[in-house]
Image (cartoon, coloured by chain):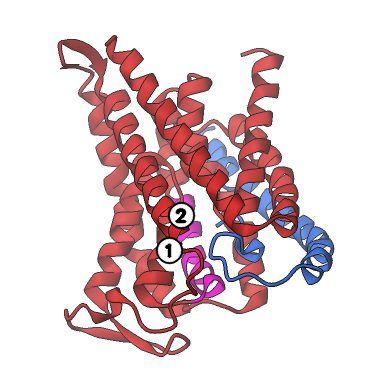
Chain colours: A red, B blue
Amino acid sequence: MDILWWTALAGMGFGVGIIAGMFGVGGGFLLTPLLIIFFRVPELLAVGTGLCQMIGVSVAAQIRYLKMGVGETKLGLMMTVPSLLGVGLGKSIAVFLEEMGRITIAGSPISASKFGISLCFFLLLSGIAVYMAIDLRRSGASLPTVPGLLTRIPIPPYTFLPRTQCRISIPVVVYIGLGLGVLSGLLGVGGGVILTPLLIYGVGMSVAMSAGTGVTMLLATSLWGTFTYAQSDRVSLPIALILLAGSTFGAQIGALIAARFEGTRLRGLFVLLVALTAIAVLIDLIKALGL
Amino acid sequence: MKVAYIIFCIVVPVLWGVFSAWLFDKVSAKRRAIQAQKSPENDPYIAADMYEI
């Protein structure tokens, strides 16, 4: 790993930071696969390092949302506990895949962790790209102002959300937290890119409210995830810090760019970037399989 | 040694996050000035206030 490698790494952090600042996402879902594909960082080390980088991102977001005083605190805390369990589960799956060693897929031997994590990333990224492409088509429509589908799931007991003025099933909240925790533990992503639209369209929250609700959970999962991965030496602090430095400054520029340009065009660009990353993950997987 | 490594892995990014929040405060004043010149848009993905989530 020479100076060029580290410079390229900082450049990637900066680039992802610009995207994060422009589109209101953490960028973990881009950073981790890019670390694996272009920087040849071992899968579990990339996941652990992604979680470590996410701590800095989440702390900054938490400070801002505390100042703003937005978010459904109760809902955020209710998701946090199962998400921590999910992180442990996700890490166990990642370790299990690593311990499986090499497996044979379509007649080609490949590391199980490489196959499993790359496949999960491909599905996640393509799902996000497809969802956002569909969402772009209804860009003229306003955000929902009535309680969404998640609030209508009839599984008691329920909890009341005072700021959103609706009730939601506690088991549903628990499963959402658990699922996002598994994603964090397995892939090293924050999950905000999934949680935010889920709260906007599924619960009927405003954008700021949904982001403020999820940030506590993201901080808790990144802290716990880093702790568990660091115990098995799967965190590279220098890589995390270089990425964090690049993404911090990139995010400021991204936020300024977002303020200057028209929203629909930017979202189209975002869909394209996510789709390209999904294709890169797929190509990398196909190359690893020797197909 | 390992305990120190784990603590560093957690404390250093936390401190960086605090710095990042401070930096954001400085930049956001400029951003708000730009946004004030632009018509508001109801867009869930271009809400700069929720960036980095």
Indicate the secondary structure of the residue bearing disc 1: helix
Q: Residue A67: which quarter of the image?
A: bottom right
- In this rendering, the count of numbered labels is 2
Indicate the secondary structure of the residue bearing disc 2: helix
Marks 1 and 2 close (CB-CB < 8 Å)? yes
**Three-letter code for the amino acid on which mark 1 is drawn:** Pro
Could you tell me how far apart the alpha carbons at marks 1 and 2 are, in whole angstroms? 7 Å
Q: Which mark is residue A197?
A: 1
Question: Do we see residue B42 in this rendering?
Answer: yes
What residue do we see at 16% from left, 79% from top? A155
**Three-letter code for the amino acid on which mark 2 is drawn:** Val
What residue do we see at 81% from left, 69% from top? B37
Magenta span dominant secondary structure: helix
Residue A31, position in %: x, y?
52, 36
Pointer 1: residues within 10 angstroms few (<14), some, or many (20+)?
many
What residue do we see at 68% from left, 30% from top? A10
Residue A249, position in %: x, y?
74, 44
- Magenta stretch: includes residue A72: no
Residue carrying label 2: A193
Q: Quadrant of the N terminus of chain A?
A: top right
Vertical position of residue A66 compared to residue A226: above or below: below
Pointer 2: residues within 10 angstroms few (<14), some, or many (20+)?
many
